[in-house]
Image (spheres, rainbow, N blue to C red):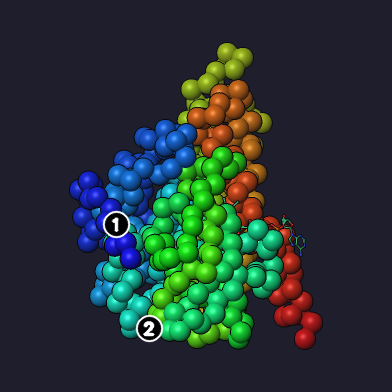
Amino acid sequence: MRPVPAIAATATADPSAPVDRASAARFVDREVVPRVAEYERAGRVPEDLLASVSAAGLWAPFLPVEAGGQGIDLLTLGAVHEEVGRGCSSLRSLLTVHTMVAWAVQRWGDTGQRTRWLTGLASGSVLGAFCLTEPEVGSDATQISTSARRRGSDWVLTGIKRWITNGQRADLFLVLARTERGVAAFLVPRDAPGVEVVPIDGMLGTRSSMLAEVRLRDAVAGPDALLGPDGFAAGMVMTGVLDLGRYSVAAGSVGIVQACVDACAEYTTSRRVGGGPLRDLQLIRARLTDMVTDLYAARALCDRAGRLKDAGAADSLMATFIAKYFASQAAARHASAAVQIHGAAGCAEDAPVARFYRDAKVMEIIEGSTEIQQITIADEVFRRVVR
Ligand SMILES: Cc1cc2nc3c(=O)[nH]c(=O)nc-3n(C[C@H](O)[C@H](O)[C@H](O)COP(=O)(O)OP(=O)(O)OC[C@H]3O[C@@H](n4cnc5c(N)ncnc54)[C@H](O)[C@@H]3O)c2cc1C
Protein backbone atom coordinates (compact mmCIF):
# COMPACT_ATOMS: atom_id res chain seq x y z
CA MET A 1 0.00 0.00 0.00
CA ARG A 2 1.10 3.54 -0.73
CA PRO A 3 2.24 5.24 2.50
CA VAL A 4 -0.04 8.04 3.60
CA PRO A 5 1.53 11.29 2.37
CA ALA A 6 2.65 13.71 5.04
CA ILE A 7 1.56 17.28 4.48
CA ALA A 8 4.63 19.42 3.94
CA ALA A 9 4.96 21.54 7.04
CA THR A 10 5.54 24.99 5.61
CA ALA A 11 3.65 26.75 8.36
CA THR A 12 5.20 27.92 11.58
CA ALA A 13 2.33 27.92 14.07
CA ASP A 14 2.68 25.71 17.12
CA PRO A 15 0.19 22.79 17.16
CA SER A 16 0.50 22.58 20.94
CA ALA A 17 -0.69 26.18 21.38
CA PRO A 18 -4.24 26.14 22.80
CA VAL A 19 -6.97 25.92 20.17
CA ASP A 20 -9.99 28.08 20.92
CA ARG A 21 -12.18 30.69 19.26
CA ALA A 22 -9.55 33.41 19.54
CA SER A 23 -6.73 31.31 18.05
CA ALA A 24 -9.02 30.12 15.24
CA ALA A 25 -10.07 33.71 14.52
CA ARG A 26 -6.44 34.81 14.27
CA PHE A 27 -5.68 31.88 11.98
CA VAL A 28 -8.60 32.69 9.70
CA ASP A 29 -7.79 36.40 9.47
CA ARG A 30 -4.12 35.72 8.74
CA GLU A 31 -4.14 32.56 6.63
CA VAL A 32 -7.57 32.27 5.02
CA VAL A 33 -9.28 35.61 4.39
CA PRO A 34 -6.47 37.14 2.30
CA ARG A 35 -6.45 34.29 -0.23
CA VAL A 36 -9.83 32.56 -0.15
CA ALA A 37 -11.13 34.22 -3.34
CA GLU A 38 -8.09 33.09 -5.28
CA TYR A 39 -8.20 29.46 -4.24
CA GLU A 40 -11.99 29.24 -4.55
CA ARG A 41 -11.49 30.19 -8.19
CA ALA A 42 -8.92 27.40 -8.53
CA GLY A 43 -11.36 24.95 -6.94
CA ARG A 44 -9.14 23.49 -4.24
CA VAL A 45 -7.73 24.38 -0.86
CA PRO A 46 -3.98 24.70 -1.48
CA GLU A 47 -1.59 22.21 0.11
CA ASP A 48 0.28 24.88 2.05
CA LEU A 49 -2.97 26.04 3.64
CA LEU A 50 -3.74 22.44 4.63
CA ALA A 51 -0.27 22.40 6.19
CA SER A 52 -1.06 25.61 8.05
CA VAL A 53 -4.23 23.99 9.43
CA SER A 54 -2.01 21.15 10.67
CA ALA A 55 0.49 23.54 12.18
CA ALA A 56 -2.30 25.37 13.99
CA GLY A 57 -3.59 22.07 15.41
CA LEU A 58 -7.04 22.61 13.93
CA TRP A 59 -7.79 19.24 12.34
CA ALA A 60 -8.97 17.34 15.40
CA PRO A 61 -8.26 19.33 18.59
CA PHE A 62 -11.08 17.45 20.38
CA LEU A 63 -9.04 14.23 20.37
CA PRO A 64 -7.41 13.39 23.70
CA VAL A 65 -3.87 14.57 24.29
CA GLU A 66 -2.52 11.00 24.18
CA ALA A 67 -3.93 10.67 20.64
CA GLY A 68 -2.30 13.91 19.54
CA GLY A 69 -5.23 16.26 20.16
CA GLN A 70 -5.85 18.84 22.86
CA GLY A 71 -8.99 17.40 24.40
CA ILE A 72 -11.01 20.58 23.80
CA ASP A 73 -14.73 20.38 24.52
CA LEU A 74 -17.41 20.43 21.84
CA LEU A 75 -18.62 23.90 22.78
CA THR A 76 -15.15 25.19 21.92
CA LEU A 77 -14.97 23.02 18.80
CA GLY A 78 -18.20 24.65 17.60
CA ALA A 79 -16.68 28.10 18.10
CA VAL A 80 -13.58 27.03 16.15
CA HIS A 81 -15.69 25.74 13.26
CA GLU A 82 -17.74 28.94 13.32
CA GLU A 83 -14.59 31.00 12.93
CA VAL A 84 -13.33 28.83 10.07
CA GLY A 85 -16.79 29.05 8.48
CA ARG A 86 -16.59 32.83 8.72
CA GLY A 87 -13.49 32.71 6.57
CA CYS A 88 -14.22 29.86 4.18
CA SER A 89 -17.02 27.31 4.07
CA SER A 90 -14.95 24.99 1.86
CA LEU A 91 -12.22 24.72 4.47
CA ARG A 92 -14.82 24.35 7.20
CA SER A 93 -16.36 21.50 5.16
CA LEU A 94 -13.01 19.73 5.13
CA LEU A 95 -12.81 20.14 8.90
CA THR A 96 -16.37 18.83 9.26
CA VAL A 97 -15.86 15.54 7.45
CA HIS A 98 -12.41 15.08 8.97
CA THR A 99 -13.93 15.61 12.41
CA MET A 100 -16.59 12.98 11.68
CA VAL A 101 -13.96 10.40 10.73
CA ALA A 102 -11.59 11.17 13.61
CA TRP A 103 -14.47 11.14 16.06
CA ALA A 104 -15.70 7.77 14.79
CA VAL A 105 -12.25 6.18 15.10
CA GLN A 106 -11.81 7.58 18.59
CA ARG A 107 -15.30 6.58 19.68
CA TRP A 108 -15.71 3.17 18.04
CA GLY A 109 -12.25 2.05 16.94
CA ASP A 110 -10.50 -0.89 18.56
CA THR A 111 -6.96 -0.52 19.88
CA GLY A 112 -5.41 -1.48 16.54
CA GLN A 113 -7.51 0.99 14.56
CA ARG A 114 -6.82 3.79 17.01
CA THR A 115 -3.11 3.08 16.97
CA ARG A 116 -3.05 2.97 13.20
CA TRP A 117 -5.07 6.10 12.45
CA LEU A 118 -5.55 8.55 15.32
CA THR A 119 -2.16 10.23 15.46
CA GLY A 120 -2.26 10.92 11.74
CA LEU A 121 -5.84 12.20 11.94
CA ALA A 122 -4.85 14.48 14.83
CA SER A 123 -1.86 15.94 13.02
CA GLY A 124 -3.47 16.12 9.60
CA SER A 125 -0.97 13.81 7.95
CA VAL A 126 -4.04 11.61 7.34
CA LEU A 127 -7.12 13.44 6.07
CA GLY A 128 -10.54 11.84 6.38
CA ALA A 129 -13.70 11.89 4.24
CA PHE A 130 -17.18 10.59 5.03
CA CYS A 131 -18.92 8.41 2.42
CA LEU A 132 -22.65 7.91 2.88
CA THR A 133 -24.49 9.40 -0.11
CA GLU A 134 -24.94 7.36 -3.30
CA PRO A 135 -26.20 8.28 -6.76
CA GLU A 136 -29.65 6.86 -5.93
CA VAL A 137 -29.73 7.55 -2.18
CA GLY A 138 -29.33 10.85 -0.32
CA SER A 139 -31.77 11.89 2.39
CA ASP A 140 -32.97 8.38 3.19
CA ALA A 141 -29.65 6.96 4.30
CA THR A 142 -31.15 3.67 5.39
CA GLN A 143 -31.56 2.70 1.72
CA ILE A 144 -27.87 2.60 0.75
CA SER A 145 -26.87 -0.24 -1.56
CA THR A 146 -23.06 -0.28 -1.28
CA SER A 147 -22.22 -3.76 -0.04
CA ALA A 148 -19.47 -5.20 2.12
CA ARG A 149 -18.65 -8.89 2.38
CA ARG A 150 -15.90 -11.06 3.74
CA ARG A 151 -13.37 -12.57 1.35
CA GLY A 152 -10.96 -14.63 3.39
CA SER A 153 -9.95 -12.35 6.22
CA ASP A 154 -10.48 -9.18 4.12
CA TRP A 155 -13.51 -6.95 3.84
CA VAL A 156 -14.42 -6.25 0.21
CA LEU A 157 -16.70 -3.32 -0.70
CA THR A 158 -18.70 -2.66 -3.86
CA GLY A 159 -20.70 0.47 -4.69
CA ILE A 160 -20.53 4.16 -5.58
CA LYS A 161 -20.43 7.07 -3.14
CA ARG A 162 -21.15 10.52 -4.62
CA TRP A 163 -20.70 14.15 -3.50
CA ILE A 164 -17.92 13.21 -1.11
CA THR A 165 -16.34 16.31 0.45
CA ASN A 166 -12.55 16.16 0.26
CA GLY A 167 -12.85 12.92 -1.72
CA GLN A 168 -10.19 14.25 -4.10
CA ARG A 169 -7.64 14.69 -1.35
CA ALA A 170 -8.56 12.48 1.60
CA ASP A 171 -6.36 9.56 2.61
CA LEU A 172 -8.99 7.64 4.57
CA PHE A 173 -12.66 7.09 3.76
CA LEU A 174 -15.26 6.23 6.37
CA VAL A 175 -17.69 4.25 4.21
CA LEU A 176 -21.19 3.14 5.15
CA ALA A 177 -22.04 -0.17 3.53
CA ARG A 178 -24.55 -2.98 3.84
CA THR A 179 -23.53 -6.37 5.23
CA GLU A 180 -25.65 -9.47 5.87
CA ARG A 181 -26.41 -8.04 9.32
CA GLY A 182 -27.35 -4.49 8.38
CA VAL A 183 -25.49 -1.23 7.79
CA ALA A 184 -21.90 -1.11 9.00
CA ALA A 185 -19.05 1.41 8.93
CA PHE A 186 -15.70 0.69 7.28
CA LEU A 187 -12.34 2.42 7.21
CA VAL A 188 -11.13 2.29 3.62
CA PRO A 189 -7.67 3.68 2.81
CA ARG A 190 -7.65 5.67 -0.40
CA ASP A 191 -4.90 3.44 -1.79
CA ALA A 192 -6.80 0.18 -1.19
CA PRO A 193 -6.99 -1.90 -4.38
CA GLY A 194 -10.29 -1.29 -6.19
CA VAL A 195 -10.80 2.31 -5.00
CA GLU A 196 -11.22 4.90 -7.76
CA VAL A 197 -11.65 8.61 -7.09
CA VAL A 198 -13.36 10.74 -9.75
CA PRO A 199 -13.25 14.51 -9.05
CA ILE A 200 -16.47 16.54 -9.09
CA ASP A 201 -15.84 20.17 -9.95
CA GLY A 202 -18.00 23.19 -10.72
CA MET A 203 -20.35 23.00 -7.74
CA LEU A 204 -22.58 25.96 -6.86
CA GLY A 205 -20.92 26.50 -3.49
CA THR A 206 -18.10 25.29 -1.26
CA ARG A 207 -16.20 25.29 -4.52
CA SER A 208 -12.82 24.34 -3.14
CA SER A 209 -14.03 21.48 -0.95
CA MET A 210 -12.62 19.00 -3.48
CA LEU A 211 -15.70 16.84 -3.96
CA ALA A 212 -15.42 13.45 -5.59
CA GLU A 213 -17.25 10.33 -6.53
CA VAL A 214 -15.63 7.39 -4.77
CA ARG A 215 -16.06 4.17 -6.72
CA LEU A 216 -15.53 0.92 -4.90
CA ARG A 217 -15.12 -2.01 -7.26
CA ASP A 218 -14.50 -5.02 -5.06
CA ALA A 219 -12.31 -2.68 -3.06
CA VAL A 220 -10.14 -4.66 -0.66
CA ALA A 221 -10.28 -2.75 2.60
CA GLY A 222 -8.32 -5.26 4.66
CA PRO A 223 -9.19 -7.36 7.73
CA ASP A 224 -9.28 -4.42 10.16
CA ALA A 225 -11.69 -2.23 8.15
CA LEU A 226 -14.88 -2.80 10.15
CA LEU A 227 -15.40 0.04 12.64
CA GLY A 228 -17.61 -0.97 15.54
CA PRO A 229 -19.80 -4.06 15.53
CA ASP A 230 -21.19 -5.36 12.24
CA GLY A 231 -24.73 -4.06 11.64
CA PHE A 232 -24.36 -1.43 14.34
CA ALA A 233 -23.70 1.53 12.05
CA ALA A 234 -27.27 2.71 11.49
CA GLY A 235 -27.61 3.63 15.15
CA MET A 236 -24.03 4.74 15.43
CA VAL A 237 -24.27 7.05 12.44
CA MET A 238 -27.60 8.55 13.41
CA THR A 239 -26.61 9.25 16.98
CA GLY A 240 -22.95 10.05 16.58
CA VAL A 241 -21.16 10.91 13.40
CA LEU A 242 -23.95 12.66 11.52
CA ASP A 243 -24.90 14.56 14.66
CA LEU A 244 -21.38 15.89 14.97
CA GLY A 245 -21.28 16.81 11.28
CA ARG A 246 -24.58 18.62 11.65
CA TYR A 247 -23.26 20.53 14.64
CA SER A 248 -20.21 21.61 12.64
CA VAL A 249 -22.35 22.75 9.69
CA ALA A 250 -24.62 24.70 12.05
CA ALA A 251 -21.58 26.44 13.53
CA GLY A 252 -20.17 27.10 10.05
CA SER A 253 -23.51 28.65 9.07
CA VAL A 254 -23.24 31.02 12.03
CA GLY A 255 -19.82 31.94 10.64
CA ILE A 256 -21.42 32.83 7.31
CA VAL A 257 -23.93 35.14 9.02
CA GLN A 258 -21.10 36.81 10.95
CA ALA A 259 -19.20 37.30 7.71
CA CYS A 260 -22.31 38.88 6.15
CA VAL A 261 -22.66 41.28 9.08
CA ASP A 262 -19.00 42.27 8.87
CA ALA A 263 -19.08 42.77 5.09
CA CYS A 264 -22.30 44.78 5.17
CA ALA A 265 -21.22 47.01 8.05
CA GLU A 266 -18.03 47.85 6.19
CA TYR A 267 -19.56 48.29 2.74
CA THR A 268 -22.48 50.44 3.85
CA THR A 269 -20.07 52.74 5.66
CA SER A 270 -17.96 53.43 2.58
CA ARG A 271 -20.63 53.27 -0.13
CA ARG A 272 -22.42 56.54 -0.74
CA VAL A 273 -25.93 56.78 -2.14
CA GLY A 274 -27.91 59.99 -2.61
CA GLY A 275 -25.18 62.10 -1.04
CA GLY A 276 -24.68 60.09 2.12
CA PRO A 277 -23.39 56.70 3.30
CA LEU A 278 -25.62 53.71 2.66
CA ARG A 279 -25.57 52.92 6.36
CA ASP A 280 -27.67 56.00 7.14
CA LEU A 281 -30.67 54.61 5.28
CA GLN A 282 -33.27 53.13 7.61
CA LEU A 283 -34.13 50.22 5.31
CA ILE A 284 -30.48 49.19 5.30
CA ARG A 285 -30.30 49.46 9.09
CA ALA A 286 -33.39 47.29 9.44
CA ARG A 287 -31.75 44.57 7.35
CA LEU A 288 -28.56 44.74 9.37
CA THR A 289 -30.56 44.56 12.59
CA ASP A 290 -32.31 41.39 11.43
CA MET A 291 -28.94 39.93 10.47
CA VAL A 292 -27.35 40.60 13.83
CA THR A 293 -30.39 39.36 15.74
CA ASP A 294 -30.35 36.05 13.86
CA LEU A 295 -26.59 35.85 14.32
CA TYR A 296 -26.94 35.95 18.09
CA ALA A 297 -29.90 33.58 18.05
CA ALA A 298 -28.12 31.03 15.84
CA ARG A 299 -24.96 31.21 17.92
CA ALA A 300 -26.97 30.71 21.11
CA LEU A 301 -28.63 27.61 19.62
CA CYS A 302 -25.25 26.20 18.61
CA ASP A 303 -23.80 26.93 22.03
CA ARG A 304 -26.71 25.15 23.65
CA ALA A 305 -26.17 22.11 21.45
CA GLY A 306 -22.45 22.12 22.30
CA ARG A 307 -23.08 22.42 26.03
CA LEU A 308 -25.59 19.57 25.98
CA LYS A 309 -23.10 17.39 24.07
CA ASP A 310 -20.39 18.15 26.59
CA ALA A 311 -22.80 17.20 29.37
CA GLY A 312 -23.70 13.96 27.56
CA ALA A 313 -27.37 14.98 27.59
CA ALA A 314 -29.76 13.01 25.36
CA ASP A 315 -31.43 16.26 24.31
CA SER A 316 -28.26 17.32 22.48
CA LEU A 317 -29.44 15.54 19.32
CA MET A 318 -32.61 17.60 19.09
CA ALA A 319 -30.73 20.75 20.06
CA THR A 320 -28.39 20.14 17.12
CA PHE A 321 -31.23 19.55 14.65
CA ILE A 322 -32.78 22.84 15.75
CA ALA A 323 -29.47 24.71 15.62
CA LYS A 324 -28.72 23.44 12.12
CA TYR A 325 -32.27 24.13 10.91
CA PHE A 326 -32.16 27.71 12.15
CA ALA A 327 -28.55 28.59 11.39
CA SER A 328 -28.46 27.24 7.82
CA GLN A 329 -31.64 29.09 6.87
CA ALA A 330 -30.41 32.25 8.59
CA ALA A 331 -27.22 32.00 6.55
CA ALA A 332 -29.15 31.61 3.28
CA ARG A 333 -31.52 34.46 4.14
CA HIS A 334 -28.83 36.90 5.19
CA ALA A 335 -26.33 36.01 2.49
CA SER A 336 -29.09 36.90 0.02
CA ALA A 337 -29.65 40.19 1.87
CA ALA A 338 -25.91 40.85 1.90
CA VAL A 339 -25.73 40.53 -1.90
CA GLN A 340 -28.73 42.85 -2.18
CA ILE A 341 -27.08 45.45 0.04
CA HIS A 342 -23.92 45.32 -2.09
CA GLY A 343 -25.86 45.79 -5.33
CA ALA A 344 -23.86 45.01 -8.48
CA ALA A 345 -20.65 44.84 -6.45
CA GLY A 346 -22.14 41.84 -4.67
CA CYS A 347 -22.78 40.04 -7.94
CA ALA A 348 -19.14 39.81 -9.02
CA GLU A 349 -17.88 36.24 -8.88
CA ASP A 350 -15.06 37.05 -6.46
CA ALA A 351 -17.16 39.24 -4.17
CA PRO A 352 -17.10 37.73 -0.67
CA VAL A 353 -20.87 38.12 -0.31
CA ALA A 354 -21.42 36.25 -3.60
CA ARG A 355 -19.41 33.37 -2.12
CA PHE A 356 -21.41 33.51 1.11
CA TYR A 357 -24.60 33.35 -0.96
CA ARG A 358 -23.43 30.28 -2.92
CA ASP A 359 -22.09 28.53 0.18
CA ALA A 360 -25.15 29.27 2.31
CA LYS A 361 -27.41 27.48 -0.18
CA VAL A 362 -25.30 24.36 0.27
CA MET A 363 -25.74 24.57 4.06
CA GLU A 364 -29.50 24.05 3.58
CA ILE A 365 -28.84 20.76 1.79
CA ILE A 366 -25.93 19.01 3.51
CA GLU A 367 -26.00 17.07 6.80
CA GLY A 368 -29.76 16.69 6.57
CA SER A 369 -31.63 19.10 4.33
CA THR A 370 -34.04 21.70 5.70
CA GLU A 371 -36.96 19.37 4.94
CA ILE A 372 -35.34 16.47 6.81
CA GLN A 373 -34.81 18.74 9.84
CA GLN A 374 -38.46 19.78 9.67
CA ILE A 375 -39.62 16.15 9.59
CA THR A 376 -37.30 15.13 12.41
CA ILE A 377 -38.02 18.06 14.70
CA ALA A 378 -41.80 17.74 14.25
CA ASP A 379 -41.61 13.97 14.85
CA GLU A 380 -39.84 14.63 18.12
CA VAL A 381 -42.44 17.18 19.18
CA PHE A 382 -45.22 14.64 18.58
CA ARG A 383 -43.24 11.93 20.35
CA ARG A 384 -42.92 14.11 23.43
CA VAL A 385 -46.40 15.60 23.46
CA VAL A 386 -48.51 12.67 22.24
CA ARG A 387 -47.43 9.66 24.28
C1 LIG B 1 -21.42 20.40 -1.45
C2 LIG B 1 -21.90 19.08 -0.97
C3 LIG B 1 -21.08 18.29 -0.18
C4 LIG B 1 -21.49 17.02 0.23
N1 LIG B 1 -20.64 16.23 0.96
C5 LIG B 1 -21.01 14.97 1.28
C6 LIG B 1 -20.10 14.10 1.97
O1 LIG B 1 -18.98 14.49 2.32
N2 LIG B 1 -20.49 12.82 2.23
C7 LIG B 1 -21.73 12.36 1.87
O2 LIG B 1 -22.02 11.20 2.14
N3 LIG B 1 -22.62 13.17 1.23
C8 LIG B 1 -22.28 14.46 0.93
N4 LIG B 1 -23.17 15.29 0.28
C9 LIG B 1 -24.48 14.78 -0.08
C10 LIG B 1 -25.58 15.32 0.85
O3 LIG B 1 -25.48 14.70 2.11
C11 LIG B 1 -26.92 15.04 0.16
O4 LIG B 1 -26.99 15.92 -0.94
C12 LIG B 1 -28.10 15.25 1.08
O5 LIG B 1 -28.18 14.24 2.05
C13 LIG B 1 -29.42 15.28 0.30
O6 LIG B 1 -29.50 14.14 -0.50
P1 LIG B 1 -29.81 14.30 -2.06
O7 LIG B 1 -28.98 15.38 -2.62
O8 LIG B 1 -29.73 12.97 -2.68
O9 LIG B 1 -31.31 14.80 -2.13
P2 LIG B 1 -32.63 13.89 -2.11
O10 LIG B 1 -32.60 12.95 -0.96
O11 LIG B 1 -32.83 13.33 -3.46
O12 LIG B 1 -33.74 15.00 -1.85
C14 LIG B 1 -34.10 15.94 -2.83
C15 LIG B 1 -34.99 17.00 -2.19
O13 LIG B 1 -36.12 16.37 -1.63
C16 LIG B 1 -36.23 16.69 -0.26
N5 LIG B 1 -36.74 15.54 0.46
C17 LIG B 1 -36.17 14.32 0.62
N6 LIG B 1 -36.94 13.53 1.39
C18 LIG B 1 -38.02 14.26 1.73
C19 LIG B 1 -39.21 14.02 2.50
N7 LIG B 1 -39.40 12.83 3.10
N8 LIG B 1 -40.13 15.01 2.63
C20 LIG B 1 -39.92 16.21 2.02
N9 LIG B 1 -38.86 16.51 1.28
C21 LIG B 1 -37.91 15.55 1.14
C22 LIG B 1 -34.82 17.03 0.18
O14 LIG B 1 -34.83 17.86 1.31
C23 LIG B 1 -34.29 17.73 -1.04
O15 LIG B 1 -34.71 19.07 -1.01
C24 LIG B 1 -22.78 16.56 -0.12
C25 LIG B 1 -23.63 17.38 -0.89
C26 LIG B 1 -23.20 18.62 -1.31
C27 LIG B 1 -24.13 19.47 -2.14
User: Nearer the N terminus, badge 1 or badge 2?
Assistant: 1
Residue 372, given in percent of the width and then of the height, sits at: 70, 63
- Report if the beta carbon of the residue with label 2 is closer than 8 angstroms to ligand 1: no
Relative vertical location of residue 89 with respect to residue 215 in this rendering, above or below: above
Residue sitting at 36 percent across and 35 percent down? 34
Indicate the quadrant of ligand 1 in the picture: bottom right
Q: Give the secondary structure at mark 1.
A: loop
Residue sitting at 71 percent across and 75 percent down? 380
Q: Amino acid at mark 1?
A: Pro
Disc 2 target residue: 110
- Pick whichever, 45 or 269, lies toward us: 45
Quadrant occupied by the C terminus: bottom right
Residue 77, given in percent of the width and then of the height, sits at: 41, 62
Q: Residue 242: name its quadrant.
A: bottom right
Disc 1 target residue: 5
Please indicate, yes or no, whether residue 303 appears anywhere in the rendered image: no
Q: Residues within 10 Å of mark 1 (few under 14, many from 20)?
A: few
Q: Amino acid at mark 2?
A: Asp
Give the alpha-carbon distance from disc 1 to disc 2, as whole Å: 24 Å
